[in-house]
Image (cartoon, rainbow, N blue to C red):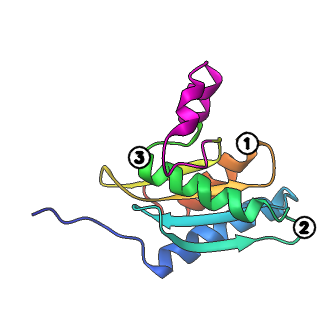
Amino acid sequence: MKTKSVLSDTEVNKILGAAKQCANDNKWAVTIAVCDDGGHLLGLLRLDGAPPISAHIAPAKAHTSALGRRESKSYEDVINNGRTSFLSVPVLQGMLEGGVPIVVDGQIVGAVGVSGVKSNEDVQIANAGIAALGLS
């Protein structure tokens, strides 16, 4: 039987705090979501001024990244490259750039999803949150 790391509330709060700091430093109003490896929401932070829809999109991006075991951008790329039938995939609703998996010892333990600014900026915020765990 294998043993695997899981995110505790301590790690979730570190991620949210660092991601919030990155967003605030850049004056970006976003929503930040953290989920476990099954895509279940562990934490959500909607910053002042973030669009209400971002509170739906950020968790969907995190969910998609966790279940897909990759950045959510890969699905957006598949669709943009003409495979529009991929839009009918069940369960995955956040097939947009901005979901980043959290990898510990080669295993996906969760993901961070961000919504509210340009997609590459969403990723920058997600990566800042994950970096707070000091996994590298």
Viewer-side residue, 87 vs 136: 87
What range is drawn magenta here? 74-95
Residue visible at 61% across and 18% down in the picture = 82
Residue 78 drawn in magenta: yes
Q: The N terminus lies in which quarter of the figure?
A: bottom left
Which numbered disc flags the more N-terminal residue, 2 or 1?
2
Of labels 1 and 3, earlier in sequence is: 3
Read off the residue under disc 1. Answer: 119
Amino acid type at image mark 1: Ser
> What is the CA distance from the residue labelled 2 to the residue labelled 1?
17 Å
Question: Which numbered tag is attached to residue 69?
Answer: 3
State yes or no: discs 2 and 3 in contact (Cβ < 8 Å). Answer: no
Q: Secondary structure at mark 3?
A: loop
- Which amino acid is tagged 3? Arg
Residue 19 occupies quadrant: bottom right
Q: In terms of image quadrants, where is residue 23?
A: bottom right
Q: Is residue 136 visible?
A: no
Q: Secondary structure at mark 1?
A: helix
Asked whether, in this view, residue 124 is left or right of residue 110, the answer is right
Front position in the image: 98 or 16: 98
Q: Residue furthest left?
A: 1
Q: Give x and y (percent) for residue 101.
A: 48, 51
Task: Pick whichever, 42 or 60, lies toward us.
Answer: 60
Amino acid type shown at disc 2: Gly
**Label 2 residue SS:** loop
Which residue is label 2 attached to? Answer: 49
Crowding at mark 2 (Cα within 10 Å: few <14, some 14-19, many 20+): few
**Contact? badges 1 and 3 (CB < 8 Å):** no
